[in-house]
Image: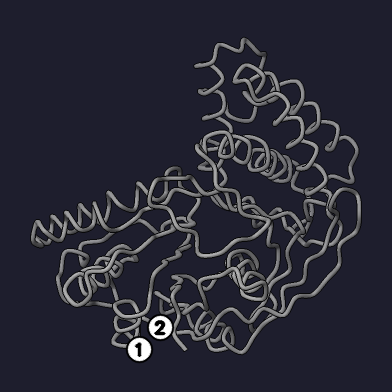
Amino acid sequence: MKTPIIQFGTSRFLQAHIDLFIHESIKNKNAAGYITVVQTTNDIKRANRLKNLSKGYIVHIKGYKNKVVINEKKQITSILRGLSTSFDWIDIENIFVTEVKFVFSNTGDNGFKINKIDSKNEFDQLKSFPGKLLDLLYARYIKNNQPLTIFPLELIKNNGNELKKIIINLAQIRNLQNSFIIWLKDEIIWINSLVDRIVSEAIEPAGAIAEPYALWAVESQPKLVMPCIHDCISVVSNLESYERLKLHILNLGHTILADIWKKQNRSVNETVYEILNDNRVYNYLNKIYFDEILPTFTSAGLQNEAINYIETTLERLKNPFLKHRLKDIAQNHQEKVFRRIQSFLIWSDSLESHTNFNELKRIVF
């Protein structure tokens, strides 16, 4: 059986998000087909996960949705095969050249970071994800020349545009022919999108525990063809409002809680649900949302959207079924403070909302 979808990354997030969407769409006959998953690193733990993905795995959905408890287990069977760039490069290249129509990636915070080895034309396992992707795209251009649609799912603003720039720049560094670069620009469809779902725990050897809420917002463009139809997918004209809501409400809220957890030296295994059971913390976060965050969204013409998203976010954060540990959220804390809080202050200043950011400035400065 052929796989029109290839996915770079084995994360529990992907298992509970796009792989689940494809699974349910296949059942409803609304998907392009099955998935080949590719591991791009040498991580042994992920290699064991890779072996088990194609056997089928459980996603356990737990939490509240519109104040109703959801508790259901789904057996996911959308992944046909799992391959590794360390051992299966020839097979991966053949599948990429002959079968694939859609490409997904979610390769972590540093997934788009390139290295010196990427300038080599021949394959090398030490290449970055963009370096390996360029190898595959060039092989397809030489042997097949058919268009592709690429959906980066990394949490990077304008992720499709950014990956396109990186790939074209690498192609120029390698002095690949100009006709190939034109093909990358004209025939490869690079899609900006945003993903949103809290996936708190892995199930070993494969599977995940996740909240009921899920979103995949995809920015429309003339040549866009979706790999599936699903209720959690929204094709939109512009992603900015979705990005602002997620970054400056959900993600910002996580960072505020992590800041409290760090400064108060709270329990090492404390979860988001547990810290919000402290009424002082809950009221503090709620006050920031409505006194310091909401006025800026109102200035941007997004008041109703922000109120709805705040209410949904508080329901999501107070999910008693997820072990969403603050020690995990607190990783790379200062970088997250800049991306989620300080960038919000800069955005608010540009809108001239004239709000007093007493608590947010205390966190940043």
Color style of the picture? one colour
Q: Position of residue 233 (x, y in %)?
A: 61, 54
Q: Position of residue 352 (x, y in %)?
A: 55, 11
Q: Is residue 279 left or right of residue 92?
A: right
Q: Is residue 133 left or right of residue 145?
A: right
What number is the disc on residue 87?
1
Q: Is residue 352 above or below residue 133?
A: above
The residue labelled by disc 2 is: 84
Q: Is residue 9 above or below residue 361?
A: below
Q: Quadrant of the C terminus?
A: top right
Residue at 29 percent across and 73 percent down: it is 126
Q: Position of residue 161 (x, y in %)?
A: 35, 46
Which amino acid type is marked by label 1? Phe
Q: Is residue 220 above or below residue 102?
A: above
Q: Secondary structure at mark 2?
A: strand
Q: Secondary structure at mark 1?
A: loop
Q: Looking at the image, do the residues carrying marks 1 and 2 touch, with CB atoms under 8 Å apart?
A: yes
Residue at 78 percent across and 66 percent down: it is 61
Q: Is residue 329 left or right of residue 348?
A: right
Q: Position of residue 180 (x, y in %)?
A: 15, 61
